[in-house]
Amino acid sequence: MTFTGGLEARARRLGRRIAFPEGDDPRVVEAAAILGRRGVVRPVVLEAEAGDEEAQGRLQRAVGMLRGGVVDGVVAGAVHTTAEVVRAGLKGVGLRPGVRTLSSSFFMEVGDFRGAGPEVLTFTDAGVVPEPRPRQLATIASEAVRVRRLVVGDEPRVAFLSYSTLGSAGGRAVEKVEEGVRRFREACPDVIADGELQGDAALIPEVARVKAPGSPVAGTANVLVFPDLDAANIAYKLVQRLAGAVALGPILQGLRAPLNDLSRGASVTDIVRVAAITALMSAKGSALGATRGLPTDR
């Protein structure tokens, strides 16, 4: 079964309550009905109340419900911008202990390109941090690992991307990535990671054998850490539109409780899938502490 194909069944077993503050959007209403009918989550759809005719007020109410434990997660963004959703999360939920930067991932379900069947790749950060510093790159990678373990359930293999592969080129941008890799390894020594790597060296085994022989990640990466927001955002949209990949996100990472964003062009199917992901992110257990010693990015 594919990643997206299994999302609903995995979320259904958890029975989570997920709030939808954009109850005046027909797509949200339809998605919530589907989720409830299939038993994927227990949807809580917020509609306007007396004295609260603004959508922003409903988003704040939903975040308050999440903070108070009334619901297990929130899905918004069909109406609100990413910036509005991020601000609501930072103000109303706050960051997890040890995390100083909110970031995001996209889960990209792609066709068979390595001879092993369809796969799901993590692209991070493609939605929030414009120009991450080395410490921030390490934190972004750490949070992407934590969220992937919860949502995908496999073992993350992290590649820090660059225009250089293990010293094949130089420059300040390469040095930033190298420093990010070093800090990540210090904080998460149990996670398989390498860099800096070019995209083809990170993903294609035949290229990896030539460009990065002996690398523990090259040719097998499933978490791609991009050097900046420009690169990541452009890459995910190209892969989505040219390769026909399913792009789910931006999935916000670093918050104390799951609040996830939608593209304002999201389809009903997108909303259903992101709700299932949000439910999986609410799971309690050892995965929440999977990346110990998170690097601070002061």
Image (tube, rainbow, N blue to C red):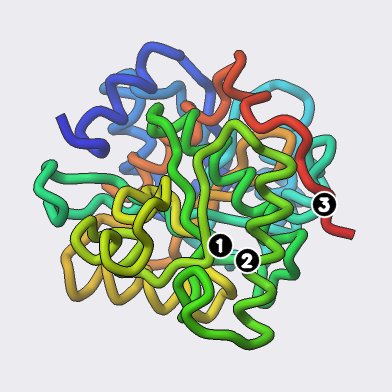
Q: Amino acid at mark 3?
A: Arg
Q: Is residue 15 left or right of residue 268?
A: right
Looking at the image, how many numbered discs can be counted on the residues?
Answer: 3
- Marks 2/3: CA–CA distance: 13 Å
- Of pointers 1 and 3, the one earlier in the residue sequence: 3
- Marks 1/2: CA–CA distance: 7 Å
Vertical comparison of 75 with 203: above or below: above
Does the CB distance between marks 1 and 2 fall below 8 Å? yes
Tell me residue 61's x, y (percent): 72, 41
Instruction: Identify which residue is drawn at 42% across, 46% down.
Output: 216
Q: Circle 2 sits in a helix, a strand or a loop, which is it? A: loop
Tell me residue 9's x, y (percent): 28, 20
Q: Nearer the viewer, mark 1 or mark 2?
A: 1
> Which quadrant, please, contains the N terminus?
top left
Instruction: Identify which residue is drawn at 45% across, 14% down.
Output: 15
Q: Circle 3 sits in a helix, a strand or a loop, which is it? A: loop
Q: Nearer the viewer, residue 236 or 16?
A: 236
Vertical comparison of 264 with 23: above or below: below
- Asked whether residue 147 is in view, the answer is yes
Residue underneath mark 3: 100
> Which quadrant, please, contains the C terminus?
bottom right
Q: Is residue 288 left or right of residue 40?
A: right
Vertical comparison of 129 with 274: above or below: below
Q: Is residue 239 left or right of residue 94?
A: left
Q: Is residue 86 left or right of residue 80?
A: right
Tell me residue 92's x, y (percent): 81, 44
Q: Nearer the viewer, residue 228 or 83?
A: 228
Instruction: Identify which residue is drawn at 68% across, 63% down.
Output: 84
Q: Which mark is residue 125?
A: 1
Residue underneath mark 2: 128
- Of pointers 2 and 3, the one earlier in the residue sequence: 3
